[in-house]
Amino acid sequence: MNCYDCATNALRPVQAVAVAACARCGAGMCRTHLHVTSDPLPGVPNPPARPEARRLTCDVCYTAERAAAGPA
């Protein structure tokens, strides 16, 4: 699988190997377009101590999720 964002870049399309798939939209992502964040428990104001879970998202979904979350 190739990185979707690299392949659809209008200015300079390239074929970069995807290292993961976005948890939200499923697009393949290379290391450049990959965002690794923690996966919070929804609706829990003070979650219990637990190991951090990874959440892998692409540039588009990362930006959309951060905008929907509002100011930090």
Image (tube, grey):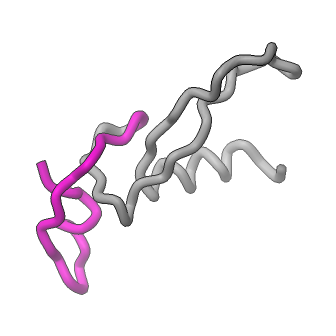
Percent across and percent down for residue 47 are: 80, 18
Query: Most prominent secondary structure in the magenta stretch?
Result: loop
Residues in magenta, as a range = 1-24
Q: Is residue 48 left or right of residue 39?
A: right
Residue at image location 65% in from the left, 22% down from the top:
51
Foreground pick, 29 / 48: 48
Q: Residue furthest bottom?
A: 11
In the image, residue 29 above or below residue 25: below
Q: Residue furthest top?
A: 48
Percent across and percent down for residue 70 are: 77, 48
How many labels sit on residues? 0
Residue at image location 48% in from the left, 52% down from the top:
35
The reply to whether the magenta stretch includes residue 23 is yes
In the image, residue 1 above or below residue 53: below
Residue at image location 45% in from the left, 58% down from the top:
59
Quarter of the view holding residue 24 = top left
Percent across and percent down for residue 29 are: 30, 53
In the image, residue 48 above or below residue 33: above
Q: Is residue 52 left or right of residue 8?
A: right
Quarter of the view holding residue 52 = top right
Residue at image location 20% in from the left, 83% down from the top:
12
Percent across and percent down for residue 27 are: 28, 45
Foreground pick, 71 / 47: 47
